[in-house]
Amino acid sequence: MILLDHMSDCRIARHLPLLGTGWDHNRIETFVKAKEQCWARHGLGHWAILIDKTYAGWGGFQKEGNDWDFGLVLRPEYFSFGGLIFDKAIAWLSVHRDVREVTFLLPHSRSRRVPERLGANHLGEVIHDGVPFTKWSLAVPRQLERRGPLA
């Protein structure tokens, strides 16, 4: 199973300190059901990401308290697509939902350069399940309404 291999990859675990070990078919099934419940509860959630019809990873939006948190977990050979996938997800969000801001947590193993380049605001350090992260927020650009040819 591709997702099982992905979630068991030590290169992924290096940047996902909450990933843990012991991934098996039952844990994958529970994980997928939890992500599907996000869609049912909030009408927004995570997608399987395909590039040229090949599984590249998963990512999307999840309600965390009052925040819409964005997460992206790619297979190592697709790491370079992260910016493009992020841009597409934010563009989709700006058209389909009235979400004004997204947040994301970065483990200390990840560089601050990417969120700074995106124009994200550093909100500080947070502890999630005993693990320190940097928390960032980014305004979601508003999609302009079309008002016809004379607008």
Image (spheres, helix red, strand yellow):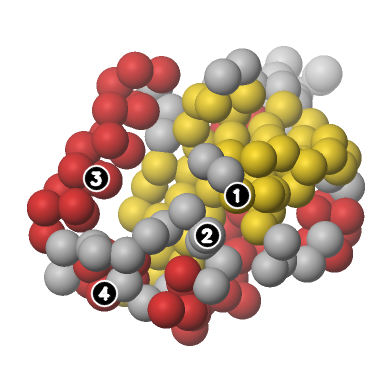
Vertically, is 13 above or below 46? below
Q: Are marks 4 and 3 in contact (CB under 8 Å)?
A: no
Residue identified by numbered label 2: 17
In front of the other: 109 or 47:
109
* Residue at 11% across, 53% down: 26
| Residue tagged 3 | 32
Q: Secondary structure at mark 3?
A: helix
Q: Three-letter amino acid code at disc 3?
A: Val
Residue at the front extreme? 130
Q: Nearer the viewer, mark 4 or mark 2?
A: 2
Rounded to the nearest whole Å, what is the CA distance between mark 1 and mark 3?
23 Å
| One can see residue 94 in this view | yes
Q: CA distance from mark 4 to mark 2?
A: 17 Å
C-alpha span from label 4 to label 1: 24 Å
The answer to whether marks 1 and 2 mark residues whose Cβ atoms lie closer than 8 Å is yes
Residue that badge 1 annotates: 131
Q: Where does label 4 land, which residue?
A: 5
Depth check: give the residue in front, 22 or 32. Answer: 22
Count how many numbered circles sit on residues in the image. 4
Of label 3 and label 2, which has the lower sequence position?
Answer: 2
